Image (spheres, rainbow, N blue to C red):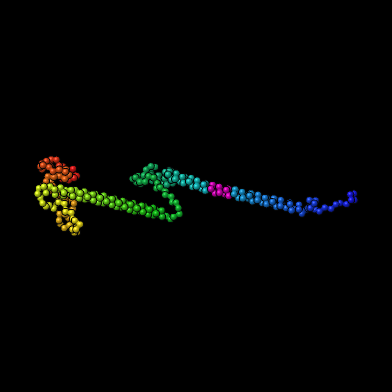
Amino acid sequence: MYGTGKKLWLPPQATGLDPDRDKQTEAPSEEGNLQAEEEDDLDKLLEQYERQAEADKAKVLSTKEEKALAQMGMAELRESALAKPLSAQTKGFQLLAKMGYKEGEGIGKSVKGRVAPIAVDLKSGRTGLGIDEGRKRQREAARLVKEAQDAKRRRGMEDLHSDYITKQAASFADRQAEQHLAQARKVCETLDRRKGITENVMWPLEPVSDGDEKEDAVEEGSWESFPAAEKLSDVLTCLRTRHLYCLFCGCQYESRDAMEESCPGATEDVH
C-alpha cells in the first residue's frame, strides 16, 4: 500500500483545521473588543461632561463674585463721594459765591442757616416713593404700643406683688395678734381671780363640749366681734393699768413708777 502515490483522507475534526470552528472562536474576541471600545468612549464622554459642568459652575460663581465686588465698590465710592463737601468748582457753589456766600459759613442773610448740604437718602428696592417712610412710621408706632403694653404689664405685676406682700404681712400680723391675745387673756383671768374678780369679758372663752351646740356667729357689736388687734390692745391695757403687768416683759411690777422705768412700752415692737 505504500508508494502508490494516493493521499489518505481524514475528517476535518482530526486535522484541527475546521474553518467554522475557527470563526466561532474568533467571533467572541471581536465582539468583546467592540464593547470595550464603546465603554471607553462613554467614559470619555462622561468625563468631558463633568469637566464642562465644573467649568460652567466656576464661571457662574466667578460672575456672581465679580458682581458682588462691583456693587460693594460702587457703594463705597458713592458713600465716599456723598461724604465729601461741595467743591468750589461746582456750579451750585459758584452761584452761592456770587451771592456773597463764603465757604464754611451758614447760608442765609444772618449766616446762621445750614452749613452742610442736605444728605442724600438713596432709595433701595422697587417700592413707590413714600412707602419706606410709611412703613418706618408704622414700625415706630408698633414699637411705642409694645413698650406701653410692656410697661402696663410690668406695673400690673408690681401691683400684684405689692398686694400679695401686703396681704401676707396682714395675715402674719393677724396670726401674731391671735397668739398674743390668747396668752394675754389667760394671764388676765389668772390675775383677776387673784384679786377676787369673778367675771371679765376679756377672759378666754369656755370650751364647748361635744354635746353642746356651738353658736353659729358672734353677736354683732359685742367685744368678741372686734378684730384681734383691737382686743389685744384692750387686754394689754387692762393688764398694765389694773395689774401692772407687761405681757412682753413677762413680769408684774411692784409699782407704776417701776413699770414706767423698766418697761419700754405696751407693744411688742418696742421690746
Which of the pair 45/71 is nearer the observer? 45
Can you see residue 94?
A: no
- Most extreme residue toward the front is 211
Reply yes or no: does residue 232 show up in magenta.
no
> What quarter of the picture does the C terminus occupy?
top left
Q: Position of residue 173 (x, y in %)?
A: 22, 49
- Most extreme residue toward the right is 4
Q: How many marks?
A: 0
Stretch in magenta: 52-62
Q: Position of residue 161 (x, y in %)?
A: 28, 50
In the figure, residue 102 lies in which quadrant? top left
Q: Residue at left 64%, top 49%?
A: 44
Q: In the figure, 261 relative to 35: above or below?
A: above
Q: Residue at left 16%, top 49%?
A: 186
Q: Position of residue 234 (x, y in %)?
A: 14, 50
Does 52 sit left or right of 73 as displayed?
A: right
Can you see residue 210?
A: yes
| Magenta residues, dominant SS class | helix
Which of the pair 232/113 is nearer the observer? 232
Q: Position of residue 250 (x, y in %)?
A: 16, 43
Which of the pair 173/138 is nearer the observer? 173
Does 218 sit left or right of 27 as displayed?
A: left
